[in-house]
Image (cartoon, rainbow, N blue to C red):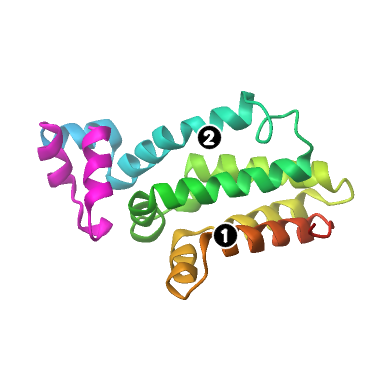
Amino acid sequence: MLAAADALFADAQAPQSVSMDAIAAAAGVGKGTLFRAFGDRDGLLDALAATKFQPLRTAVESGPKPLGSDTPASERILAFLDAVLTFKLENRNLMRAREVTATGNLQSERYRWMHGLLQRLIQDATPTCTTGDAGYAAHALLAVLHIDLVDELLDTGHSVEDIRRTQAAQALAVIGQAPE
């Protein structure tokens, strides 16, 4: 079911047009089966995003540098934000469907995990930063990676490299380091 949904979102001109009916038909199951498995469209989108995001999460939780725990927090923040940007660009239609047309993205398990990780890394990189300040900063850094903003930047002439460079400079500013 997730493979069928992934294929439909990848090929869709407008991700909001991918219906549960279309996913069920492509998967060869009844629509009720989808609803029993995922609850609703947002649940399906969360499950698909989580499945596709898992390699990145594994790299962060148990992988080598630059995402793994052996990397200094400031370097890890930059590598993680860059990996999230890459993930979103590689899964643009799925991200549009989940972040733009669905509800509750900030409550998704994937977002809560990303936010918690960034909050901890910001606190590790800036020991004087309070938990509340680090939490706010984590939200701010993730907000600029919302697919709508990334698409807008690309549509108005910014390159992916421009976005990467600016994101890194913002992250370094948050933790009080000057860009190299």
Q: Quadrant of residue 175?
A: bottom right
Q: Which mark is residue 56?
A: 2
Q: Crowding at label 2, few (<14), some or many (≥20) Cα neighbours within 10 Å?
A: some
Q: Which amino acid does label 1 sit on?
A: Glu
Magenta span includes 10: yes
Name the residue at 79% across, 37% down: 72
In percent of width and height, residue 166 lies at 65, 64
Identity, as a three-letter code, of the amino acid under mark 2: Leu
Is residue 117 covered in magenta?
no
Could you tell me which secondary element the residue under label 2 belongs to?
A: helix
Residue at point 46% right, 67% down?
Answer: 154
Q: In this view, does 17 lie to the left or right of 53?
A: left
Q: Which span is picked out in magenta?
A: 1-29
Residue 107 on image: x %, y %: 49, 48
Q: Mark 1 or mark 2, which is nearer the start of the sequence?
A: 2
Residue underneath mark 1: 161
Label 1 secondary element: helix
Write the residue at 41% across / 36% down. Answer: 52
Foreground label between 2 and 1: 1
Closer-to-camera residue (10/114): 10
Which residue is most to the right? 128
- Name the residue furthest top: 62
Q: Where is residue 157 in the image (x, y as percent from the top left)?
A: 48, 74
Closer to us: 174 or 72 = 72
